[in-house]
Amino acid sequence: MKVLLVNGSPHKEGCTYTALTEIANELERNDVDSEIFWIGTKPVQGCIACGVCKKNPGKCVFDNDPCNELIKKFEEADGIIIGSPVYYASINGALSALLDRVFYADAEKFANKPAAGIVSCRRSGSTVSFDRLNKYFAISKMPIVTSQYWNAVHGNTPEEVKQDLEGLQTMRTLAKNMAWLLKSIQHETEPECEEVMFTNFIR
């Protein structure tokens, strides 16, 4: 079993990475492999609603940023945890643009994969950002893994994050719950789903 940990911060080894590392270490203690994937700092294309990914499922038309690589990693992972810093009480804009395309292009293949979001902030905006990440999972039929509190760490530097003992414990509890859920569903069959219906309210 393997959990993909997405570092959605422009800082490769900053506060978000520190929280994800705490999760990775706890997953290892629970016999679950993990990989931290950093989205990097190169420009990320926003979705232009061209619909090409619907003709070629699982592949975005733009191939000059991490989108298609991330789609493949999502498909291969058993569980997914996405981390982001808080910017203006929301997630990193580059990460948001990336996830919009990843989930629109291939969400059907992510169904029933346990997932969770985590956020890192200096002071506030954590719960709004946390909710923003969870929206991707909820619309994609992905079980959302919980912890003992909202999944956030506080601090302006990795050293300060390491002083947030409650936040780090929340990360470890999340990892334990992710490992437990993965092991629980390992031999279960996926639930039968109806064909999706769309209702438009303006005719």
Image (tube, grey):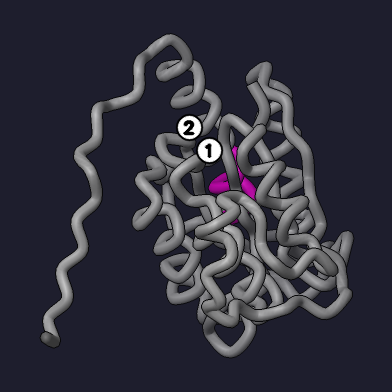
* Tag 1 and tag 2, C-beta contact below 8 Å: yes
Looking at the rendered image, the quarter that the N terminus falls into is top right
* Residue type highlighted by circle 2: Asn
Q: Characterize the local packing of mark 2: few (<14), some (14-19) or many (20 or more) Cα atoms within 10 angstroms.
A: some
Magenta span covers which residues? 167-172
Question: Disc 1 designates what residue?
Answer: 173
Q: Residue at x 17, y 76 (%)?
A: 200
Quarter holding residue 150: bottom left
Q: Is residue 69 above or below residue 84?
A: above
* Residue 36 inside the magenta-drawn segment: no
Q: Position of residue 158 (x, y in %)?
A: 82, 63
Looking at the rendered image, the quarter that the C terminus falls into is bottom left
Secondary structure beneath dot 2 equals: helix
Q: Is residue 165 above or below residue 127?
A: above
Number of residue marks: 2
Quarter holding residue 155: bottom right
Question: Disc 2 designates what residue?
Answer: 177
Q: Residue furthest front?
A: 55
Calculate the distance from the C-alpha at mark 1 to the C-alpha at mark 2: 6 Å
Q: Main SS of the magenta segment?
A: helix
Q: Characterize the local packing of mark 1: few (<14), some (14-19) or many (20 or more) Cα atoms within 10 angstroms.
A: many
Q: Position of residue 41 (x, y in %)?
A: 87, 74
Q: Residue at x 66, y 77 (%)?
A: 92
Quarter holding residue 33: top right
Relative placement, left or right, of 167 versus 9 is: left
* Residue type highlighted by circle 1: Thr
* Residue 169 inside the magenta-drawn segment: yes
Q: Is residue 192 above or below residue 150?
A: above
Question: Can residue 138 be seen?
Answer: yes
In this view, the residue in front, 65 or 142, is 65
